[in-house]
Image (cartoon, rainbow, N blue to C red):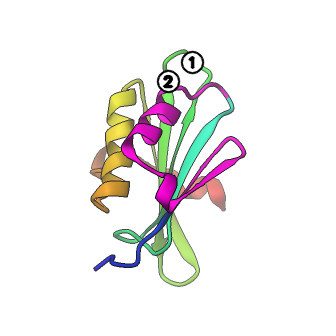
Amino acid sequence: MYSTLRYTLESNGTTYENDSINASLLVELISNLELQEFVVLVPSELVEGSMYMQAAALEEPGQMVAEIRLQEGEDSFRHYSCRTTDTTGIIQWFVDYWGKQQLPQLESWQDITHEFD
Protein backbone atom coordinates (compact mmCIF):
# COMPACT_ATOMS: atom_id res chain seq x y z
CA MET A 1 0.00 0.00 0.00
CA TYR A 2 2.76 2.48 0.95
CA SER A 3 5.63 0.86 -0.95
CA THR A 4 7.00 4.19 -2.16
CA LEU A 5 6.29 6.15 1.03
CA ARG A 6 9.14 8.35 2.22
CA TYR A 7 9.31 10.84 5.06
CA THR A 8 10.88 14.19 5.72
CA LEU A 9 11.46 15.27 9.31
CA GLU A 10 11.95 18.94 10.12
CA SER A 11 13.10 20.21 13.47
CA ASN A 12 14.20 23.75 14.22
CA GLY A 13 15.79 24.52 10.88
CA THR A 14 17.24 21.04 10.27
CA THR A 15 15.72 18.69 7.70
CA TYR A 16 16.24 14.94 7.87
CA GLU A 17 15.51 12.88 4.78
CA ASN A 18 13.95 9.42 4.82
CA ASP A 19 17.14 7.36 5.20
CA SER A 20 18.29 9.44 8.19
CA ILE A 21 15.06 9.00 10.16
CA ASN A 22 14.81 6.31 12.82
CA ALA A 23 13.09 5.76 16.16
CA SER A 24 16.15 6.96 18.10
CA LEU A 25 16.14 10.27 16.25
CA LEU A 26 12.42 10.75 16.94
CA VAL A 27 12.97 10.01 20.65
CA GLU A 28 15.92 12.41 20.85
CA LEU A 29 14.23 15.32 19.07
CA ILE A 30 10.86 15.04 20.82
CA SER A 31 12.37 14.43 24.28
CA ASN A 32 14.51 17.55 24.02
CA LEU A 33 11.99 20.05 22.65
CA GLU A 34 12.20 23.46 24.27
CA LEU A 35 9.87 26.45 24.02
CA GLN A 36 9.45 27.69 20.44
CA GLU A 37 10.88 24.42 19.07
CA PHE A 38 8.99 21.90 16.97
CA VAL A 39 9.22 18.62 15.10
CA VAL A 40 7.24 18.01 11.88
CA LEU A 41 7.04 14.61 10.19
CA VAL A 42 5.80 14.80 6.59
CA PRO A 43 5.02 11.69 4.51
CA SER A 44 5.49 11.72 0.73
CA GLU A 45 1.86 10.60 0.38
CA LEU A 46 -1.12 10.82 2.69
CA VAL A 47 -1.06 8.39 5.63
CA GLU A 48 -4.68 7.47 6.41
CA GLY A 49 -5.57 10.89 4.99
CA SER A 50 -3.03 12.83 7.03
CA MET A 51 -0.68 15.40 5.55
CA TYR A 52 1.72 15.65 8.52
CA MET A 53 2.15 15.26 12.26
CA GLN A 54 3.90 17.81 14.44
CA ALA A 55 4.85 18.35 18.08
CA ALA A 56 5.98 21.41 20.01
CA ALA A 57 6.85 22.44 23.54
CA LEU A 58 4.45 24.84 25.28
CA GLU A 59 5.09 27.62 27.82
CA GLU A 60 3.80 25.61 30.76
CA PRO A 61 6.65 23.42 32.08
CA GLY A 62 6.32 19.83 30.87
CA GLN A 63 3.41 20.66 28.54
CA MET A 64 3.61 19.68 24.88
CA VAL A 65 1.21 19.74 21.98
CA ALA A 66 0.88 17.25 19.15
CA GLU A 67 -1.06 18.16 16.03
CA ILE A 68 -2.12 16.34 12.91
CA ARG A 69 -3.70 17.61 9.70
CA LEU A 70 -6.06 15.46 7.65
CA GLN A 71 -6.91 16.28 4.06
CA GLU A 72 -10.62 16.60 3.47
CA GLY A 73 -11.52 16.84 -0.20
CA GLU A 74 -9.28 18.67 -2.63
CA ASP A 75 -9.13 22.08 -0.98
CA SER A 76 -9.89 21.58 2.70
CA PHE A 77 -8.53 19.91 5.80
CA ARG A 78 -9.27 19.10 9.46
CA HIS A 79 -6.63 19.99 12.03
CA TYR A 80 -6.49 18.21 15.39
CA SER A 81 -4.52 19.06 18.51
CA CYS A 82 -3.70 17.24 21.75
CA ARG A 83 -2.04 18.94 24.73
CA THR A 84 -0.29 16.59 27.11
CA THR A 85 2.55 16.10 29.58
CA ASP A 86 3.06 12.56 28.26
CA THR A 87 6.20 12.87 26.13
CA THR A 88 6.39 9.08 25.82
CA GLY A 89 2.88 9.04 24.34
CA ILE A 90 3.81 11.67 21.75
CA ILE A 91 6.94 9.71 20.84
CA GLN A 92 4.83 6.57 20.39
CA TRP A 93 2.42 8.45 18.09
CA PHE A 94 5.36 9.58 15.93
CA VAL A 95 6.98 6.14 15.88
CA ASP A 96 3.66 4.54 14.87
CA TYR A 97 3.03 7.23 12.24
CA TRP A 98 6.51 6.73 10.78
CA GLY A 99 6.98 3.00 11.28
CA LYS A 100 3.46 1.59 10.92
CA GLN A 101 1.72 4.37 8.93
CA GLN A 102 -0.82 4.47 11.74
CA LEU A 103 -2.59 7.51 13.17
CA PRO A 104 -3.22 8.07 16.87
CA GLN A 105 -6.77 7.61 18.16
CA LEU A 106 -8.11 11.11 17.45
CA GLU A 107 -11.36 10.81 19.43
CA SER A 108 -9.79 12.57 22.43
CA TRP A 109 -8.00 15.19 20.32
CA GLN A 110 -9.48 18.67 19.87
CA ASP A 111 -10.58 19.76 16.40
CA ILE A 112 -8.97 23.20 15.97
CA THR A 113 -9.64 23.59 12.24
CA HIS A 114 -11.49 26.86 12.91
CA GLU A 115 -8.20 28.46 14.05
CA PHE A 116 -6.93 28.31 10.45
CA ASP A 117 -9.88 30.08 8.78
Q: Which residue is mark 2?
A: 63
- 34 over 82 or under it: above or below: above
Residue range in magenta is: 8-35
Distance CA(mark 2)–CA(mark 1): 5 Å
Judging depth in this view, the residue of 10 and 90 nearest the camera is: 10
Judging depth in this view, the residue of 20 and 58 nearest the camera is: 20
Q: Is residue 61 left or right of residue 99?
A: right
Is residue 23 a member of the stretch shown in magenta? yes
- 110 over 98 or under it: above or below: above
Q: How many marks?
A: 2
Q: Amino acid at mark 2?
A: Gln
For the N terminus, the image quarter is bottom left
For residue 79, say whether it is visible: no
- 34 over 26 or under it: above or below: above
Q: Which residue is mark 1?
A: 60
Please name the residue shown 50% across and 30% down the image.
64
Q: Are marks 2 and 1 in contact (CB under 8 Å)?
A: yes
Q: Horizontal and vertical percent for residue 57?
A: 57, 29
